[in-house]
Amino acid sequence: MGDGGGMSEGRAIYAADPMASRGRLVPEEASPTRSPFQRDRDRIIHSTAFRRLKHKTQVFVFHEGDHYRTRLTHTIEVAQIARALARALRLDDDLAEALALSHDLGHTPFGHTGEDTLDELMRPWGGFDHNAQALRIVTGLERRYAAFDGLNLTWETLEGLVKHNGPMTDRQGHGVGKYAGKRVPRAILDFNADYDLWLWSHASLEAQCAALADDIAYDAHDLDDGLRAGLFALSDLREVPFLSSLLDEIYALWPNLETSRVIHELGRRVITRFVEDAIRESERRITALHPRRADDVRLCGRTLVAFSPAMEEADRTIKAFLFPNMYRAPSVLRIRQQADTIMRDLFGRLFAEPGLMPDEWHQGLAEAGEDKRARRVADYIAGMPDRFAVDEHRRLFDVTPDLR
């Protein structure tokens, strides 16, 4: 298997076992001190793409202040929740952490606006998908190691990175779930042809923990950021029964608590309730399946790490509240429109004049077709932190939106 390291005590028999890993695309010598999944986690943390998350937007752009989430702070919060879920379920928390830390590597600058715009611009050449981009980063675009491109992560980490939200195809290769009626991104299909990730199966429980942790973190920190930004008030949350009950609990204990502390108490209760519910519901589902190995989870045909129906409803109502009150708030939409302009301008100019990119990015494009040129430009722009994208726009254009 080409890796070593100790095995955690008390791991469930259906957990991912680092000592039984399917290995790496390029075999490597075992580490005497770290398991394969620990090495994956460390490589992700030391990657260039991970560092760039510091200046990539979650919902607000960086001008909004230091207290709002970026992709990096969101990723750290997701990793903490994923570890908590994995440990409670007796899984490999190193794998869960590695997947949480890598889940946003493929995101563009300017949050979902950047991805939506880049996907539209790239439609003639296969579109843009942040999940596929994350795979491209960890299997090729990161160029740090002498023996291989990418990070040479284990099969289990690559599998979880690609399909943590569930199967991508059926056994015949037709898209399912998010990709139903659509083509799975070419980058994923091309890599899968060389290194079969079982796109038709569910991922490990560790990957499912990372996916659910992402949902929990989004709900909690978007409420926190929205409240602190003044997009809505605590009183507005009364329309969400789950949040209203938590506010009642807080005010019963501290009737005169200052608003900033109420916001924090609310956020920690949201996370706690979701995590505790997910542990109970996941244990119930796992017990009902009675898996004897990790592949039993992959082949069972359903998600096992999940909320109860009551908490699924709470999650749904929180997201239903946030959509109009935060993601579509006038001030946020105004910034989204400005970010869209920056993305379109950058792509158009760099596609027309790839020599404006650094040497290592435009080398070999002089005789390349449009497909290769467009993908190279998309790779370059997708890797930009928000601030760098704005600076590049200022370098190339006379007028740049101020994103305020």
Image: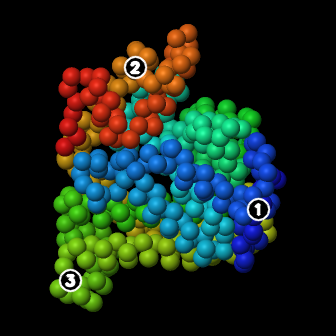
Which residue extends farthest bottom? 253
Q: Nearer the viewer, residue 275 or 68?
A: 68
- At horizontal 79% and vertical 45% (from top left) the residue drawn is 27
Q: Secondary structure at mark 1?
A: loop
Q: What number is the disc on residue 128?
A: none
Residue 62: tell me if it is visible: yes
Q: Quadrant of the C terminus?
A: top left
What color scheme is it?
A: rainbow
Instruction: Count the marks.
Output: 3
Q: CA distance from mark 2 to mark 3?
A: 55 Å
Say whether residue 349 is left or right of residue 28.
left
Give the amino acid at mark 2: Leu
Question: Which residue is depicted at the point 37% across and 20% down?
Answer: 348
Residue 297 found in image quarter: bottom right
The label nearer to you, 3 versus 1, is: 1
- Check if mark 2's residue and mark 1's residue have beta carbons within 8 Å: no
Mark 1, other Cα within 10 Å: few <14 / some 14–19 / many ≥20: few
Mark 3 surroundings: few (<14), some (14-19) or many (≥20) residues within 10 A: few
| 148 in relation to 261, above or below | above
Residue type beneath disc 1:
Pro
Compared to 125, does 13 lie above or below?
below
Which secondary structure lies at badge 3?
loop
Residue 32, labelled with which disc?
1
Asked if the residues shown at circle 3 and circle 1 are in contact, with their CB atoms under 8 angstroms apart, the answer is no
> What residue do we see at 19% from left, 66% from top?
233
Residue at numbered disc 2: 356
